[in-house]
């Protein structure tokens, strides 16, 4: 097997060293079971995860739980739901104790005097038409006003099949409000008509994602290797799915032989006791899963497989850097 230093020149080796020190240990937390939207295709509600546990409402129990998570070695708390901004006291309990990231639909403005540098990822599903169809309203019109120019916020742009040929407008409008954007693909968990991917569409959208990265390198937090992985679901000839997924809660992980995985990863429900199967829907068919973070993590936990060539290792470094930027471990 080749070594890292033999594959990289000095500049790439410095980039490698910067990320290899990070040792990211993430887990995911349902902050609440409630949301101020009900998107068609929401993995949380469509899989019944909102009913899997009743919310813990005692803030002292949240605080004690988070302290225990810290002792368990977690150094990145990814807050989801439901809509975390409906429970700011819980978000604050995380923020005061652990490096945290808050996923939100952006309809409620997180008060920056209370959370000065909390990284916020705002969801946007396609353009205005897609948003109205899938989410009932053009959320960008509201979220962009709430977060315009915020240095610790980016949009998580979920691309639908209808976005082919139309992504540039969305990326430009995000750029115009002074924010960054990261891309992922819709998994269509509720089989909404016209929103499931056909194989040839993956090729088209991959080309378009690459072109957007060329055109908007300062706005897009992305990499060509990530585009390849997420559109093909293939890495080094292996296929993404249950047998390979790194983002499975460790207590649910009975896979043999065990794949490379996120160490001690758990997705917690809001009762602070129940665990969900993985980082996304309990009921999703893994063969159609397009979860962006799970694909990024898949690359990241498989460093050894990328010690095959300089190009493979550089692709691995770029994906790792992308993840580290999105979760504030390194600057944009
Ligand atoms: S905003 Fe998020 S949590 Fe709320 S319904 Fe939509 S996808 Fe689900
Ligand atoms: S649904 Fe996606 S994230 Fe969950 S176990 Fe399957 S492949 Fe992994």
Image (tube, rainbow, N blue to C red):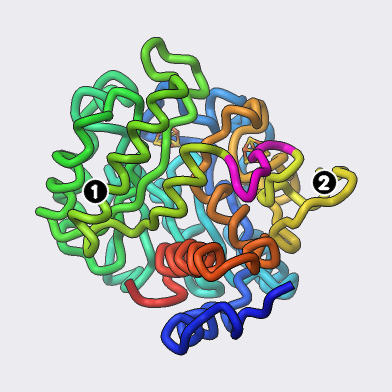
Q: Can the viewer see residue 93 in this picture?
A: no
Q: Nearer the viewer, residue 255 or 267?
A: 255
- Residue that label 1 marks: 212
At x 57% / y 33%, what residue is drawn? Answer: 289
Q: Which residues are magenta?
A: 234-242
Looking at the image, is 116 positioned above or below residue 53? below
Label 1 sits on a secondary structure element that is helix
Q: Is residue 215 found left or right of 15 in the rendered image?
A: left
Q: Nearer the viewer, residue 10 or 175?
A: 10
Give the x, y percent position of residue 21: 59, 83
At x 14% / y 50%, what residue is drawn? Answer: 145
Give the x, y percent position of residue 250: 79, 52
Mark on residue 253? 2
* Number of other residues with Cα within 10 Å of mark 1, as a class: few under 14, some 14 to 19, many 20 or more: some
Q: Is residue 185 magenta?
A: no
Give the x, y percent position of residue 100: 49, 66
Disc 2 from disc 1: Cα separation: 37 Å
């Amino acid at each position: 097997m080749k070594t890292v230093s033999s594959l990289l020149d000095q500049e790439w080796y410095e980039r490698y060293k910067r990320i290899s020190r990070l040792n990211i240990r993430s887990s995911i937390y349902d902050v609440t079971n409630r949301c101020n939207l009900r998107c068609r295709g929401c993995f949380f509600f469509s899989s019944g995860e909102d009913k899997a546990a009743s919310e813990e409402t005692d803030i002292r129990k949240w605080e004690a739980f988070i302290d225990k998570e810290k002792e368990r070695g977690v150094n990145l708390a990814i807050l989801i739901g439901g809509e975390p901004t409906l429970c700011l006291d819980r978000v604050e309990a995380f923020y005061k104790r652990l490096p945290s990231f808050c996923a939100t639909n952006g309809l409620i403005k997180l008060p920056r005097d209370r959370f000065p540098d909390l990284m916020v990822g705002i969801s946007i599903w396609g353009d205005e038409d897609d948003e109205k169809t899938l989410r009932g309203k053009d959320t960008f019109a509201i979220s962009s006003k709430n977060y315009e120019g915020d240095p610790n916020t980016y949009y998580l742009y979920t691309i639908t099949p209808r976005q082919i040929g139309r992504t540039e407008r969305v990326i430009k409008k995000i750029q115009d409000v002074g924010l960054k954007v990261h891309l992922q693909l819709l998994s269509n968990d509720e089989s909404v008509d016209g929103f499931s991917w056909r194989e040839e569409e993956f090729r088209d959208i991959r080309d378009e994602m690459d072109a957007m990265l060329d055109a908007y390198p300062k706005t897009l937090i992305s990499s060509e290797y990530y585009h390849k992985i997420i559109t093909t679901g293939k890495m080094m000839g292996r296929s993404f799915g249950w047998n390979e997924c790194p983002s499975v809660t460790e207590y649910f992980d009975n896979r043999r032989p065990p794949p490379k995985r996120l160490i001690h990863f758990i997705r917690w429900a809001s009762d602070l006791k129940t665990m969900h199967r993985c980082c996304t829907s309990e009921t999703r068919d893994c063969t159609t899963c397009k979860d962006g973070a799970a694909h990024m993590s898949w690359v990241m936990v498989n460093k050894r497989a990328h010690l095959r060539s300089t190009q493979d290792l550089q692709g691995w470094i770029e994906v790792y850097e992308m993840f580290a930027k999105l979760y504030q471990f390194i600057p944009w």
